[in-house]
Amino acid sequence: MRLSFPHMGNLYIPIKTFFESLGIEVVVPPLSNKETLELGVKHSPEFACLPLKVNIGNMIQALEKGANTIVMAGGGGPCRFGYYSEVQREILSDLGYDFEMIVLDPPKGNLLKLVKNIKRLIGDNSFKKIWFSARLAWKKAVLLEELDYADGMARVSKKLNKKKANNLFNYFEKEIDLTVSFDKLQCIENQMKECYHDLTPSFEPIKIGLVGEIYTVLDNFVNMDIKKKLEDWGVYVDKSISLTEWANTNLLLRLLNIHGEKNTEIAARPYLNHFVGGHGLQSVGNTVLYANKKFDGVLHVLPFTCMPEIIAKSILPAVSKKYNIPVLSLVMDEHAADIGLNTRLEAFVDLLCKRKEGMKDEILFRS
Amino acid sequence: MRIGIPRGLLYYLYKPLWEKFFAELGLEVVVSKKTTKNTLKKGIEVTVDDICLPVKIYHGHVISLKDNVDVVFIPRLVSIKNKEFICPKLMGLPDVIRANIKDLPPIIEPTVDLTSSWLGFYRAVFEVGSYFTNKNTVILKAFYKATKNFKNYTQALEKGARPDEILEGCCNLLSNKAKFKILLLGHPYNLYDPFINLNMIKKIENYGARVITPENFTETIFKTHLSKLNKPLFWTLGNKLLAAAYQLKERRDIDGVILLVSFGCGPDSLIGELIERWIRKNTDIPFVLLTIDEHSGDAGLNTRIEAFMDMIERRKAT
């Protein structure tokens, strides 16, 4: 079995670690790039949302690299993502690829199917080995998030210049990726603490909350590195969605059925009173929470035609008005271009600066 | 008390149920007038640009109603079948309307959610009923009459009448005289609002064809054909389209299939792809996909329908 999976941000690092330490051969598709997108757009339905198109591109590139099994997450709706796997299987087999797709669906009354699929993936590995692999992968996921945060603060506080920050980030990402032992990871963590110390900026930066659809928030290819872009301008960006937190609430707690009503849902209630699939409800709720935390603005990113986020997009102006916080919705699709994004971000940040008196000169630094 | 029902979205499916229920409760039911250019214009003014056409038009209907009624009925239809959903946009509909339109009368917004339990439906019925009366017997009686009315409607549909014909009261079943049968696939709010689809049904039938729609098929057809699916689909309206397409392999009387989708429709972007691939692989029935939005023009649609019908006519002749 030569296993592959589509990309979402740097999620490939923990996933690869998990399967490789179980002794499975993993084929990581090339990091999403222009060619990926072109392939995806060419073979996907025209009005499908961007994640499906990028996924298709990833899968084709993986199959070309020799993968013969694709593992894909499923879902129970109402967001389109839950039916991705079926459409992708159809498209890829019509293209003539010979492969098997293993879909991990959340157990909605069909726990057996999930267990069976997981069993197919992990084979005869002992429970102990699975536990160690999972622990290693999880640690990597946590470290990558810490790295992302530290790197962001280093950029915002201007303690490191852009080039140095890039180098350091790439160095650590590679180290985390290549490490296979848990102890070594601990060393890397210490090393990270040394390199990224004293990150408190000497000024009070503009603070922006990033809300929206999970794939667009987490995948830097799709959101065109929006976070780093802003951080290089000295703007602090808080991602409302983190992978580890999402996994915690959605995989562990929901499986055990002990997740209660979350803060975001309560905060969203006056504006959106029902779950609408994906992260639509969270986008509205988090915007309210960011306003309460006195953030200067909120960026809302979504793929074109994303249903849950269109609901959020319809409602966010009302929230923005009520809480007096600027909100900018950015719609991403295969035609989105760097320049267009830059212009809008600059205008938005300018606006936030004007609102926040006395910060004007210090913060707007463009490289 | 006057209750307003916007003529849009699932109104075309549930009119006989809703209208009868409210009438039996002793309310004056006001349905917004048929969609016009003005309805669309009003709707576009208040909505975000990437929401789909039927929702924009629904906004227009709510605006036209809001000053003439005491309450508006905007149900939150989450799920009308176990483990299935309608569409995220309908799940957030009352909230979106409230965010977009100012000075609204009170909204009656029952949540109809059958995802986990069939009881969800009755909960919604009593939630609506108790707004107007505190006598449960009255609600039950009204509900009974409404369901009876609704049943007659669905039976007529299964016999081959189309919702637009029944709602207009002009049921002329020319199926015997018709030269061809065209299966028009799409969501009810697109198929039965002649403004949205630029009078498409009439246009097709002018070529001597009989148009049948997913509403003409029985529940059993859906069940048998959907069991083939690798993974059950979680959109009720999408399921209808898929099943209607899947049965084409066994039916020999359909001469052509037209799939009508609104621009930016999420579920249809995937289902349309599945249907198209399936029809091309498993049948030799001509298929065309037409996308409509607020910029669709009569001429463009005419050309395409004309070409499609010409082709079918020629195929039939040979």
Image (tube, coloured by chain):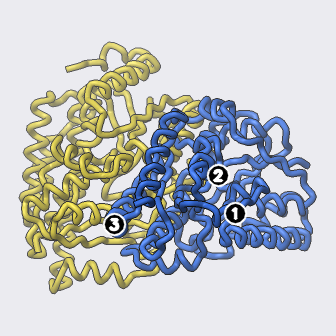
The subunit letter for the residue under badge 1 reads B
- Badge nearest the viewer, 3 or 2: 2
Q: Residues within 10 Å of mark 1 (few under 14, many from 20)?
A: some
Residue A276 percent coordinates (x, y): 53, 55
Q: CA distance from mark 3 to mark 2?
A: 30 Å
Q: Is residue B114 above or below residue B190?
A: below
The subunit letter for the residue under badge 3 reads A
The answer to whether residue B271 of the structure is visible from this angle is no
Can you identify the residue that label 3 sits on?
Answer: A86
Mark earlier in primary sequence (1, 2): 1
Q: Quadrant of residue B283?
A: bottom left
Same chain assignment for discs 3 and 2: no
Residue B240 percent coordinates (x, y): 53, 66
Residue type at the position of mark 1: Leu
Can you identify the residue that label 2 sits on?
Answer: B192
Looking at the image, which residue is at 46% across and 80% down?
A109
The quarter of the image holding the C terminus of chain B is: bottom left
| Chain with colour blue in the figure | B
Residue type at the position of mark 2: Tyr
Chain A, colour shown: yellow
Can you identify the residue that label 1 sits on?
Answer: B173
Q: Nearer the viewer, residue B207 or B77?
A: B207
Q: Nearer the viewer, residue A320 or A150?
A: A320
Residue B47 percent coordinates (x, y): 58, 35
Q: CA distance from mark 3 to mark 1?
A: 38 Å
